[in-house]
Image (spheres, rainbow, N blue to C red):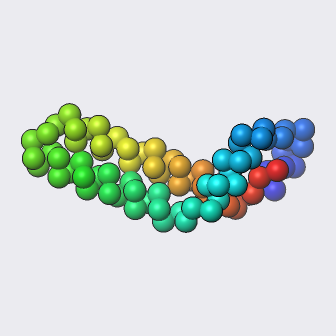
Amino acid sequence: MLENVNPEHKEGPVARKIEEQTAKIPSDVFLWAALTSIGVSLTLKIMHKRHDALFVGQWAAPFLLLGIYNKLVKLQGHD
C-alpha cells in the first residue's frame, strides 16, 4: 500500500528487525501501559510526589505513539 508511494525506499536491517518484533506485541499492551502510567502518576500526585508524578505521567504519550507505530506495522507490514 505505502510501497507505491516511494518504491525506491527500503527499510534498513535494524528497522526491519524492530518491526518484526513489535508486530508480535498486541496493540492493547501499549494502551494499558499508557493508562497505567496515568494511574500511577495520579497516585503519586495524591501522595504529594509532584516530580515523580510528572515523570511517570509523561510516559503515556510515548506508549500511545508506540501503539500507533505497532498498528501501522501490522496493517502496512514491512519490506
Drawn side of residue 12 relative to residue 24, left or right: right
Relative placement, left or right, of 5 versus 62 is right
State whether residue 72 appears in this view.
no
Relative height, residue 49 to residue 39 (above, below): above
Inspect this view and state whether residue 15 appears: yes
Q: Position of residue 6 (x, y in %)?
A: 85, 41
Residue 32 screen position, x and y as percent: 40, 62
Residue furthest right in the image: 8
Horizontal side of residue 58 vs 62, given as left or right:
left
Which residue is depicted at the point 61% across and 58% down?
Answer: 71
Name which residue lies at 84% across and 38% down.
9
Q: Is residue 6 left or right of residue 52?
A: right
- Say how many tags the image has: 0
Q: Residue furthest top?
A: 51
- Give the residue drawn at x 75%, y 57%: 77
The quarter of the rendered structure image containing the N terminus is: bottom right
Q: Quarter-wise, where is residue 34 in the image?
A: bottom left
Query: Considering depth in this image, is 5 or 68 the residue closer to the camera?
Result: 68
Depth order, front residue of 14/69 = 14
x 56%, y 53%: residue = 68
Question: Residue 63: horizontal and vertical position, in percent?
Answer: 45, 49
